[in-house]
Image (tube, rainbow, N blue to C red):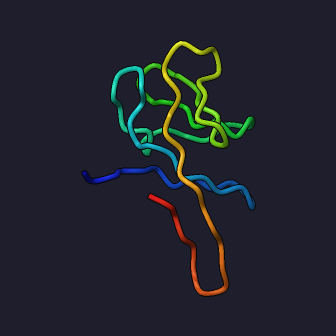
Amino acid sequence: MKNTFAWCGKEKNFAAVSNRCTHNGESLSKGKVNFANEIVCPLHGYQFDLRTGREYQQRAADLETFPIKIEADGVYIGL
């Protein structure tokens, strides 16, 4: 099974989450990261916390999140 994720970064806060909105399947890589460190789905505005994957108003299932490890030789994402 192939994992597709959205790589998000704002200042020094990086996250890797599932690229599909759990509400309607829209690609979250088309969305934006807001001031609260949430990725916002471009289709219906659902907001998912990049640390936990939880949707702000709990209207949809949580996103899958992936661990990130930053080392001197690169960035590693646990898929």
| Quadrant where the image shows the C terminus | bottom left
| Residue 51 picture quarter | top right
- Across and down, in percent, residue 49 comes to 64, 34
The residue drawn where x is 42% and y is 42% is 30
How many numbered marks have been drawn onto this rendered protein structure?
Answer: 0
- Across and down, in percent, residue 39 comes to 57, 37
The residue drawn where x is 61% and y is 28% is 54
User: Between residues 74 and 9, which one lies in front from this camera angle?
Assistant: 74
> Residue 75, relative to residue 5: is it above or below?
below
| Residue 9 picture quarter | bottom right
- Across and down, in percent, residue 37 comes to 70, 40
The residue drawn where x is 42% and y is 26% is 22
Residue occupying the far left of the picture: 1
> Residue 39, relative to residue 14: is it above or below?
above
- Across and down, in percent, residue 75 comes to 57, 73
> Residue 47, relative to residue 20: is it above or below?
above
